[in-house]
Amino acid sequence: MGRIARRVHQAGVYFVTTDTWQKHPLFINAILANIVVEQIISCRERGFYSLHAFVLMPDHLHVLLTPGEATTVERAMQMIKGGSAFRIGKEKPQSFPIWHTGFHDRWMRDEQEYRGSKKYIERNPVEAKLVGVPEEYEYSSTSGKYMLDVSQFDRDRG
């Protein structure tokens, strides 16, 4: 059975989740985790998307982003996943794929949904008992180490 092609490019903010291949906890390895985070930031800086929040967990990634004018959600995720897999392959080759095929995305309909998704991203490492408070988690936008972009919902708030 073939994959369903996505046909809609709707402007706005998306909450995107993707897993590692077979949920392997690859990103407990700091070298691999840093490569993924660097790729997320690099793609933002190159204009593929505006980045509102992210968290890289040991076996999955959550990102809150707005695709750039010439970018789809699919292209943004291809740049993150494909780019990081390529770099990991050069730095520390693996005997299996890095990422599970595909991803799940949800278009944010309103500020309440956006805020809930952002809070979920921020709290994910705490809920997984990796840290005591969100700011302690190194591979997250809550660490304060990474530049984030204002979303349409942040602007609407004033």
Image (cartoon, rainbow, N blue to C red):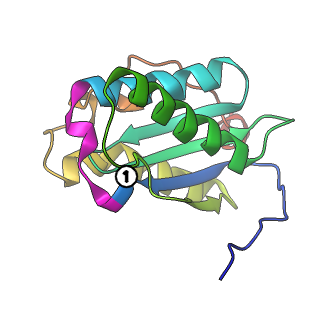
Q: Quadrant of the N terminus?
A: bottom right
Q: Quadrant of the C terminus?
A: top right
Q: Residue 56 is drawn in which quadrant?
A: top left
Looking at the picture, which amino acid does disc 1 mark?
A: Thr
In the image shown, does 85 or 34 lie closer to the viewer?
Answer: 85
* Residue 143 seen anywhere in this rendered image of the structure: no
x and y percentages locating residue 77 in the rendered image:
61, 44
x and y percentages locating residue 62 in the rendered image:
45, 48
Q: Reply above or below: 108 against 80.
A: below
Query: Residue at the spot x=57%, y=19% of the render?
Result: 42
x and y percentages locating residue 131 in the rendered image:
15, 38
Q: Reply above or below: 130 against 83.
A: below
Residue on which disc 1 sits? 20
Q: Reply above or below: 106 against 25.
A: below
Q: Is residue 4 left or right of residue 27?
A: right
Q: Reply above or below: 109 against 53.
A: below
Query: Residue at the spot x=13%, y=39% of the render?
Result: 132
Which region of the structure is painted magenta?
A: 22-30
Q: Residue 30 is drawn in which quadrant?
A: top left
In the image shown, does 104 or 120 lie closer to the viewer?
Answer: 104
Query: Residue at the spot x=63%, y=43% of the render?
Result: 78
Find out whether residue 21 is within the magenta segment. no
- The crowding category of the residue bearing disc 1, from other C-alpha atoms within 10 Å (few below 14, some 14 to 19, many at least 20), is many
Magenta span dominant secondary structure: helix
